[in-house]
Amino acid sequence: MARQLTAVYIKQGEWYTAYLEEIPGVNTQGRTKEEARANLEDALRLFLEANRELAQQDISQHEDVSEEPFALVERAA
């Protein structure tokens, strides 16, 4: 089974703030919980795209580099 992330929603006045517990820096807000959830998905996509671009810049400076898909799968306890 693929790893699930934990979204935290905090009602503050007329707004909801939202963040991912497991990934610092992925946070957003919305007027409704649904809007905050949609914005959180966008924030995660932008976060991953930015990290990918930074990694590609670093990779381009090395000669012997390999890449492969990677999935974090929950292990049975």
Image (cartoon, rainbow, N blue to C red):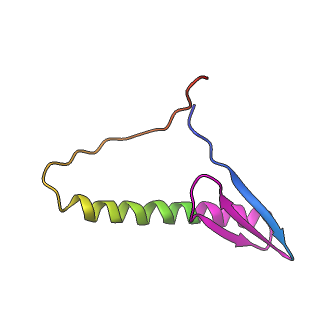
In the displayed structure, 76 sits above or below 62; it is above
**Residue 56 in the figure: left or right of residue 12:** left
Question: What segment is highlighted magenta in the picture?
Answer: 14-42
Membership of 75 in magenta stretch: no
Q: Please state the horizontal and vertical placement of residue 11, each as a whole percent of the image.
A: 83, 68
Q: Please state the horizontal and vertical placement of residue 2, each as a whole percent of the image.
A: 56, 36
Quadrant the C terminus occupies = top right
Q: Please state the horizontal and vertical placement of residue 47, each as a whole percent of the image.
A: 49, 64
The quadrant holding residue 8 is bottom right
Membership of 32 in magenta stretch: yes
Q: Please state the horizontal and vertical placement of residue 68, each as a whole percent of the image.
A: 31, 41
Q: How many marks?
A: 0
Q: Residue furthest bottom?
A: 14
**Residue 26 in the figure: left or right of residue 58:** right
Residue at the image point whose x is 43% and y is 63% from the top: 49
Q: Residue furthest left?
A: 63
Q: Residue furthest right?
A: 13
Residue at the image point whose x is 62% and y is 42% from the top: 4
Residue at the image point whose x is 46% and y is 59% from the top: 48
In the displayed structure, 27 sits above or below 66; it is below
- Given residues 75 and 4, the one toward you in this image is 75
- Given residues 34 and 10, the one toward you in this image is 10
The quadrant holding residue 26 is bottom right
Residue at the image point whose x is 58% and y is 39% from the top: 3
Quadrant the N terminus occupies = top right
The quadrant holding residue 51 is bottom left
